[in-house]
């Protein structure tokens, strides 16, 4: 019993529901309780995806198959696995030890193991064959999964009640060792018409976790969370830069929940640039805030906006999820749905050029490729890319001009003036525009300097 009271009410009349056991209600652990959790994973926490259930394909260190079966294996939004143990009645004295064993076994999963396990589950539940690669794509769309996150599974124990010895052990594991483990209590009630089931968090007390953790463990968990979030952001940004799917200067808008956006509305209206940033190929600071023209990480800029504009201090957030393009896709969405990086025909871009632009590009293309034997060109969906030892420039087509983004040159050293072709830039690149044949010589000179910078 968890001490809660449940009533059915009709106007001023309240009738207390009678607490009963699941067995009294004719409900079973696997056929009913497990199915409820699979159908409603939100009872386990926020952003939970079921990976498998009744998993028992363990192999011991001697190559012998283990016989125990894990009730539910899930994945949270941070890329950590959840080991879930379900008990229809009061939990046995050893339930936490059983869960720890499962967590230890799960922590040895490789990414290939996880993909195969989820593929079997999806095949079983959908009735159609699901490949490991399809399962992997599904998991990647849910969370950023890293080797570090796989090594640190979380534990959820669920029962009608827990012995004091179990609770004491769980408190020790959580407070002193920093293990992410929680106890969920469910209770069935008989009303005059139905059987109701409630689920509540028994430990740690929801909403006050910072008060039940020791200071040392609390700081360690904050540091671990911060490190994981930074790694997750770095992975997202690195994948986007590596895939070359975003244009230099591409615009992104800050996006959050309707409640937060309503809070920020007036602050954004005072200076519209506060809600926007542009992309640059910089692994540490890829967003340039339009409010101050300074570079930031996606998380750093999202946190700054939330603190200054909404008065919210957020310790852990997934910054790339807060920035969306014109189509409403966040940086996370784009990274999780990267297209195959195959060459597209050059005609994909030349067909968009006007009769005046096409000969300008042909001359520029020939001149760039003649800069050295190491210079090459790739035609990608988002533009033409030229490389020396590393990327030299991007060329994109616009109505009356070609934009040339030269890497390795600093806008402070090559400032934009009314008399040159440079229109903008950052410390990592400059943006020049090719409009007429008279611009050719100057832009080629900038490209020569960009290529030279690769040798230093």
Image (tube, rainbow, N blue to C red):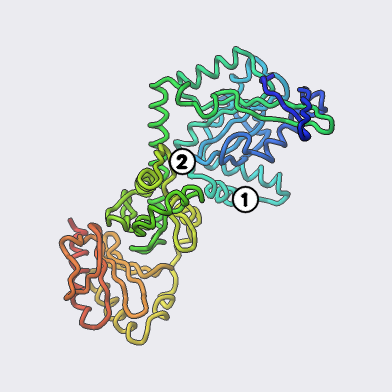
Of the two numbered discs 1 and 2 on the same chain, state the one appearing first in sequence. 1
Q: For the residues carrying marks 1 and 2, which lies nearer the camera in this image?
A: 2
Residue 275 or 378: which is nearer the viewer? 275
Asked whether residue 147 appears in the rendered view, the answer is yes
Q: Which residue is mark 1?
A: 131
On the image, the x and y values in percent for residue 109 come to 53, 35
Q: Secondary structure at mark 1?
A: loop
The quadrant in which residue 37 appears is top right
Asked whether residue 31 appears in the rendered view, the answer is no
* Pointer 2 local density, CA inside 10 Å: few below 14, some 14–19, many at least 20: some
Residue 49 is left or right of residue 381, and the answer is right
Residue 290 or 53: which is nearer the viewer? 290
Residue 194 is left or right of residue 144, and the answer is right
On the image, the x and y values in percent for residue 373 come to 25, 68
| Residue furthest bottom as drawn | 355
Q: Secondary structure at mark 2?
A: loop
Q: Residue at x 52, y 31 (%)?
A: 153
Q: Which residue is mark 2?
A: 146
On the image, the x and y values in percent for residue 449 come to 18, 66
On the image, the x and y values in percent for residue 301 come to 35, 48
């Amino acid at each position: 019993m968890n001490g809660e009271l449940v009533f059915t009410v009709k106007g001023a009349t309240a009738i207390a529901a009678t607490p009963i056991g699941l067995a009294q209600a004719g409900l079973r652990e696997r056929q009913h309780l497990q199915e409820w959790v699979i159908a409603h994973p939100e009872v386990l926490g926020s952003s939970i995806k079921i990976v498998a259930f009744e998993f028992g394909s363990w192999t011991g260190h001697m190559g012998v198959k283990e016989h125990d079966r894990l009730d539910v294996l899930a994945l949270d939004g941070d890329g950590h696995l959840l080991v879930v143990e379900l008990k229809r009645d009061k939990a046995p004295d050893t339930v936490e030890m059983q869960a720890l064993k499962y967590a230890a076994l799960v922590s040895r999963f490789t990414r290939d193991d996880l993909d195969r396990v989820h593929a079997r589950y999806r095949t079983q539940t959908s009735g159609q064959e699901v490949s490991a690669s399809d399962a992997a794509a599904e998991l990647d769309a849910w969370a950023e999964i890293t080797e570090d996150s796989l090594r640190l599974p979380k534990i959820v124990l669920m029962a009608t009640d827990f012995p004091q010895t179990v609770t004491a052990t769980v408190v020790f594991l959580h407070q002193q060792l920093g293990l992410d483990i929680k106890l969920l209590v469910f209770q069935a009630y008989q009303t005059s018409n139905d059987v109701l089931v409630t689920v509540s968090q028994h430990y740690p007390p929801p909403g006050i976790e910072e008060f039940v953790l020791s200071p040392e463990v609390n700081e360690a968990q904050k540091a671990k969370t911060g490190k994981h979030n930074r790694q997750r952001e770095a992975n997202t940004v690195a994948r986007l830069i590596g895939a070359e799917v975003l244009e230099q200067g591409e615009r992104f808008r800050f996006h959050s929940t309707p409640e937060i956006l309503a809070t920020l509305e007036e602050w954004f209206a005072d200076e519209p640039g506060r809600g926007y940033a542009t992309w640059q190929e910089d692994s540490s600071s890829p967003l340039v805030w339009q409010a101050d023209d300074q570079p930031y990480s996606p998380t750093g800029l999202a946190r700054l906006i939330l603190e200054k504009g909404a008065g919210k201090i957020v310790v852990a957030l997934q910054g790339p999820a807060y920035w969306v393009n014109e189509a409403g896709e966040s940086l996370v969405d784009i990274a999780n749905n990267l297209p195959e990086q195959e060459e597209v025909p050059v005609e994909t871009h030349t067909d968009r050029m006007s009769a005046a632009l096409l000969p300008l590009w042909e001359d520029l293309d020939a001149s760039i490729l003649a800069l050295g034997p190491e210079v090459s060109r790739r035609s990608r969906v988002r533009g033409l890319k030229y490389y020396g030892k590393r990327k030299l420039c991007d060329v994109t087509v616009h109505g009356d001009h070609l934009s040339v983004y030269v890497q390795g040159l600093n806008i402070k050293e090559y400032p934009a003036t009314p008399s040159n072709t440079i229109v903008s830039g950052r410390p990592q690149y400059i943006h020049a525009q090719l409009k007429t044949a008279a611009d050719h010589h100057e832009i080629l000179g900038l490209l020569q300097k960009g290529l030279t910078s690769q040798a230093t």
